[in-house]
Amino acid sequence: MAEKPARPRLTRAMSRRSMLAGAAAAGVTVPVVAAGLGTAAAAPETARPARAGVTRRITVYAEEIGGGLFGYGLSPGTATVPGPILEIWEGDTLEIDLVNNTDRRLSIHPHGVDYDVDSDGSPLNASFNEPGQRRKYIWKTRAPYQKDGRWMPGSAGYWHYHDHAMGGDHGTDGLRAGLYGALVVRREGDLLPKRQYTVVFNGMTINNRVAPDIPVIEANLGERVEFIAIGHGDFFHTFHLHAHRWADNRTGMLSGPDDPTQVIDNRDLNPGDSFGFQVIAGEGVGPGVWMYHCHVQFHSDGGMAGVWLIRNADGSMPEGAQETLDRYHQHHHAMQEPQQLEQQQPGTTHEGH
């Protein structure tokens, strides 16, 4: 087998263009999310909507990327896998003009928000884009409200969107090809992160890639970082983040010292599922390179493992971090075909290295 070319070492001298390209491939918002809610470096740690009940309008372009991949982007030629993180405040409306720049039928379907049948994004309701077609989808949100003396849930949460029409009535081909992304609905008073990352367990891949070709995600020590985890495909997964933990609730944070919410560092992530949380990069453990991966063992052996580089607070490379990154990039994972996975039984061995 031919030897792989050496990978560039990570330095602060990387061009902004390279940084943006790598971040887009990793599913990070750089630097402002689509619907106008800022998560750039200058964003305040807490935020309140300037006004409630507003309608935000964006245009999303569905495009073929190459290599069998399709993606969503906010301008022509910018489609990525996963697509851009879309954010709105609870109580607001998001209007999406979806432009289908492909030769395939497709759509955009949300989880966690309100929409009518015309914005369902499913062939069942004749809600999709033919090749070259432009179509509007309207997603609405609401705050918690009382009904019949009971409190009903609002829309705030870590949700997602995806195709529901390519290759069939359920969009299976679109999901396999990368037509998916994160949808965040904020509640007034929620903390805003410094950085965001979308991690999608899709089939036996992370963001349609396997190690060591999953882009390295980054933060500086002490920064507030938000992870949005999404599941697609046909397999059971669990999401595990090394050295950090979160509360298993809407925000990932405790309301006080006596909050009984379970604190976890591993959670099931099955097809159609999504959750999110915020952590402080390196809190209590320091800078370095930390793994995130599926904890189903033969899945991680097969390449469902990425790495998170936490730099020093000043942005410099921690001691030993480059060597760890080199080990990750030199490691070989054996990707299994779906038929092999179906034959894999608990208790059997799998040689993945």
Image (cartoon, rainbow, N blue to C red):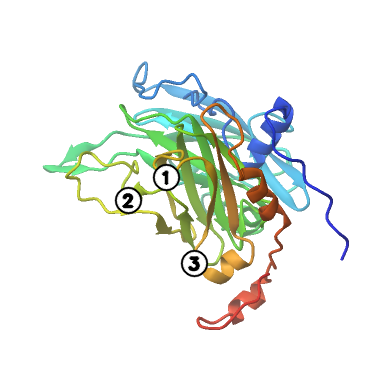
For mark 1, does the 10 Å Cα neighbourhood hold few (<14), some (14 to 19), or many (20 or more) residues?
A: many
Residue 276 is tagged as 1
**Label 2 sits on residue:** 248
Q: In percent of the image, x 55 and y 51: which residue is there?
A: 200
Q: State whether residue 16 is above or below residue 64.
A: above
Query: Which one is in front, 247 or 173?
Result: 247
**Label 3 sits on residue:** 236
- Whether tag 2 and tag 1 are in contact, CB under 8 A, the answer is no
- Sequence order check: which comes first, mark 2 or mark 1? 2
* Distance (Cα) linking label 1 and label 3: 18 Å
For mark 3, does the 10 Å Cα neighbourhood hold few (<14), some (14 to 19), or many (20 or more) residues?
A: some
Q: Nearer the viewer, mark 2 or mark 3?
A: 2
User: Where does the image place residue 244, in percent across and percent down from the top left?
Assistant: 42, 48
Q: In percent of the image, x 36 and y 22: which residue is there?
A: 47
The answer to whether one can see residue 243 in this image is yes
Quadrant in which the C terminus appears: bottom right
Q: State whether residue 196 is above or below residue 15.
A: below
